[in-house]
Amino acid sequence: MHLSTFIPSQSLSCRLNPPEGCHITAVCRSNYSAIKSNGIRIESTVFGPQTFKPDVVADQTPEGQYDYVVVTAKAFPLSNQAELLVPGVTAGHTTIVLIQNGIEIEDPYRKLFPENPILSCVVYLPVTQSSPGVFVHVEMELLVIGTYPVAAPQSHKEKAHIFGSLIGEGGATAEVQDDVQSERWQKLLVNASWNTICAVTRCRDAEFLSFNSKESYEPAVGVIEDIMKEISMLAIASGYPKIDEKKVAFQLDRARRRITGAKDQGVEPSMMGDALHGRQMEVDAIIGNPVRIAERLGLGGKVPMLRLLWIITQALNGSPRR
């Protein structure tokens, strides 16, 4: 079995021990030279330290017949990313696996590869690239997998289960869901709120809460709650009623626990890291698409927080002084 994995510059999702018979090609960008020379160094509080060396390391998609092409790069610009896959995709054979943030990210791949199975995945894997090819992983690991669209043929559903089994055989955790979009909305509660707020303020989540008031951080929590409630409203309007106030409350409680029990300044979301280093942020996938969904549903006037954050983060993305 042949897999091609697009290794991102700032985050990584990989199996720790490739299952027997799997041959892995890693397509890298800015970290190409480091990974070509030294492999992928993983420093994990979950799995321990280790180095993984792909069978092939390339700086662009090699031609070949791959069973799975796994995209773990940041979700921008989606149309260009889909085109980068062309040399490695065999029509009707290759399964395209999208391990990316955001909502409604799949269409460019579906349009370009209408005959291929597409798996949409949500990853819970706090990872930072500390130097080229060196990835620090903490806290948890889970990959949630589903087909796109939900009503995909049974043969595509089987590809999802096979891929999930491969992840499990490699030592990591995978869960296959019939409709993974619900999981995407749930993660968006966190990404649309904390990613954007932390990027704009340059504060980690616990810092943002503690810096706002010496007496009480509840007003700051209220801002995050307002953003999450707008995402919840859009999810429910899109047919996902489980993304409700209970889910919002759960995520807010996680933030409260971090500030009351954290030994450091909290979590640095990926968009904050990108902003600090002058890199492009996933503005459209995480915040732009929800605003567009709101407009499409006739709810554009009911997402003032999302609209404001979209405008601000777009400006931040384009600013030469950030």
Image: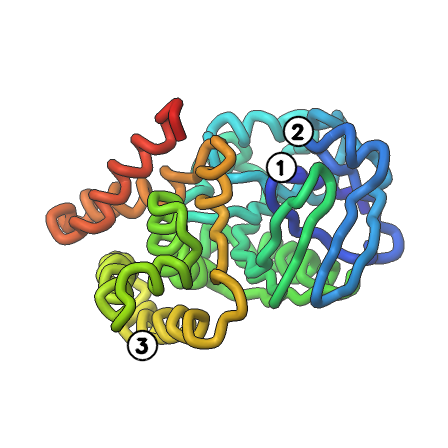
Q: Pointer 2: residues within 10 angstroms few (<14), some, or many (20+)?
A: some
Q: In this rendering, which labeled residue sits more in front, label 2 or label 3?
A: 2
The residue labelled by disc 2 is 30
Q: Pointer 3: residues within 10 angstroms few (<14), some, or many (20+)?
A: few
The residue labelled by disc 3 is 246
The residue labelled by disc 1 is 9
Q: Looking at the picture, how far across and down is residue 321, in whole percent?
A: 38, 26
Tell whether label 1 touches label 2 (CB within 8 Å): yes
Label whose residue precedes the other's in the sequence (1 or 3): 1
Label 2 vs label 3: CA separation? 41 Å
**Mark 1 is on which residue type?**
Ser
Which disc, if any, is residue 309?
none
Label 1 vs label 3: CA separation? 35 Å
**Mark 2 is on which residue type?**
Ser
SS class of the residue under badge 1? loop
Label whose residue precedes the other's in the sequence (2 or 1): 1
